[in-house]
Image (tube, rainbow, N blue to C red):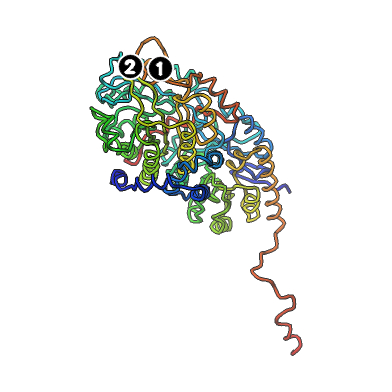
Amino acid sequence: MSFVQELDHLPFEELEAAALSSNDDSVSRALSRSALGGLDLHDFAALISPAAGKRLEDLARVAHALTVQRFGRTIQLFAPLYVSNECVSTCAYCGFSRPNQVSRLTLSPKDVLEEARLLLGQGFRHILLVSGDHPKKVSTSYLEEVIGLLHPIVPSISLEVATFPEEDYRRLASAGVEGVVVYQETYKRDTYSAVHLKGPKRNFQWRLDTPERAARAGMRRIGIGVLLGLANWMRDALALVAHARYLMRRCWQSFLTVSVPRLRPAAGGFVPLHSIGDREFVQLVCSLRLALPEAGIVLSTRERPELRDGLLRLGVTHMSAGSRTMPGGYKGQVYAEPQFELEDHRTPAEMAERVRALGYDPVWKDWEAVLHGYDHC
Amino acid sequence: MADELIIAGRAFCSRLMVGTGKFPSPEVMRDALDASGTEIVTVALRRVDLEYPGQDLLSFIDRSRYLLLPNTSGARTAKEAVRLARLAKAAGLSDWVKLEVVPDPRYLLPDPVETLKAAEELLSLGFVVLPYINADPVLAKRLEALGTATVMPLGSPIGSNRGLKTRDAIAIIIEQAEVPVVVDAGLGAPSHAAEAMEMGADAVLVNTAIATAEDPVRMARAFRLGVEAGREAFLAGRAPVKERAEASSPLTGFLETIS
């Protein structure tokens, strides 16, 4: 069983047509159903429709209420820690893409520890290790070594690196990894092939099945997402919700987060194929909350401060802050190219202060290292 | 005689336990705890920063006033729950533990098999165990037989605010119990808490409904009053509910006239 069978049978044309022809009644129906938790993909199509765009305040109110009920007025803070920008894949939109003539670097495990210590000093207890797609440089053994150093001092470690077989995820889970983040980028196959030109990332289905493999291997947290700007955003949002629902059924023991990063300028000069404006972006975040009341929604520093502050009340539950998107970026002495440009440059302390000022509790720690590992296998 | 709640030999005046998650700030949490009149406060160990004491929510809980009840939220197996409880004990937090073994992060329903296993192990290690369970009367008796200090059946899924959806099963648990029954999870309004107390529950535990209210401090006070009202009603011996109206003149009165 794989999500690919479900994905290939989703009636996208019908759903997109339903979205475009939605009216005030279908939006009202979707809104009232979402309060009861019985929202289907047609309802979700209505929520992301132009008709629902006119009722953004109504969407926002429900999204806010559902989020507060489930997560309280809290925002969990985390930091990405880039361990490498070396990459064997050629992806048209990414600064790390193999052909880009940029300085490349993989941190030694000791350097990673040094970066982690700096993040701990800033208050972070949830760290996401990030790298390009390089299964040899950032291998399972390398990661085990890194995690061996980090695990005694970092309560929660997640990975956003190359994709691995289930056995490797099992090793990493028992080494102390809590979660795996793997965005499909786009669920539209032809677009996927057009932007992922060479390398292991070209394999659409392998990537699609990765979250399930990771969950089966015992990962407690699974992050999925799309990169907005590659394909039509409505279509990718529909597929993302279908994927999330599939994973919630199949991988019912893992906490699911979703993310919808918007494409940012990066080395290589890729121009987004599609765009999504701020208003539609907010509509999408609210709609994701309505469709997936129990999922975490992650928002990075790609977005502007004003937008992040506003979205914090509309469904977002996890935020990065003070991010550096190049290896060694926190220490700042080694130079390597960033993955993309950032918009929110506030320090972690400034971000936490802002969260408090907005009436929310910034949560630095919500996991415990002794919880890692899987006892069922 | 004072109406005290006795758990593991310790006496409490308040029958409202309060959870510490989801509050908009630790200051609001502290004030809500005060307003609730609670004496038992549960804290998720995963939120506690043992490495950096004094910087997290523990520093907002006056431990001379409240019994700190660490919970094992995040554990999905007995082994993980035991590891967390031992960590709490080693750090000097408590040897009381609210046992939560929840494999399902979506509906947050407890695993009965792993809960029973974990309870057995924790009891053998000398912990005072308060297990969170589904409203299953047989499981409640099994845990009681092992020696748990209470049983804590859920009213409805955690955070759902739906009230006593498991009312009939909870009534059986209360009827059969020889340890305090604490209704935990799902109580969304003071009336729900009052209902549980009227039924004869020994205490209730509330978190989401207080923490996510517009005014958590005021809601904490409201729950305090709801719990007190329900308890008073239970002690007063409320009149039984009647299925149908009762005829005011007796149906067998004719027997008097023919004798």
Type of the residue with mark 2: Leu
On the same chain, marks 2 and 1? The answer is yes
Type of the residue with mark 1: Glu
x and y, in percent, of residue A4 in the image: 29, 43
In the foreground, B202 or A146: A146
Residue position marked by numbered label 2 in the rendering = A107
x and y, in percent, of residue A222 in the image: 38, 36
x and y, in percent, of residue A33 in the image: 50, 50
**Chain where mark 2 sits:** A
How many numbered marks are there? 2
Could you classify mark 2 by the number of other residues whose Cα lies within 10 Å: few (under 14), some (14-19), or many (20 or more)? many
Q: Residue at x 33, y 20 (%)?
A: A269
Q: Is residue A140 left or right of residue B192?
A: left
As drawn, the label of residue A115 is 1
In the foreground, A302 or B57: A302
Could you classify mark 1 by the number of other residues whose Cα lies within 10 Å: few (under 14), some (14-19), or many (20 or more)? many
Q: Residue at x 51, y 56 (%)?
A: B137
In the foreground, A148 or A4: A4
The furthest residue to the bottom: B258
x and y, in percent, of residue B209 in the image: 60, 43
As drawn, the label of residue A62 is none
Q: Is residue B129 visible?
A: yes
Q: In this view, does B221 lie to the left or right of B79?
A: right
Q: Quadrant of residue A277?
A: top left
Q: In which quarter of the image is residue B37?
A: top right
Q: Is residue B119 visible?
A: no
Q: Is mark 2 on a helix, strand or loop?
A: loop
Q: Gap between marks 2 and 1, in whole Å?
A: 10 Å
Labelled pair 2, 1 in contact (Cβ < 8 Å): yes
Mark toward the start of the polypeptide (2 vs 1): 2
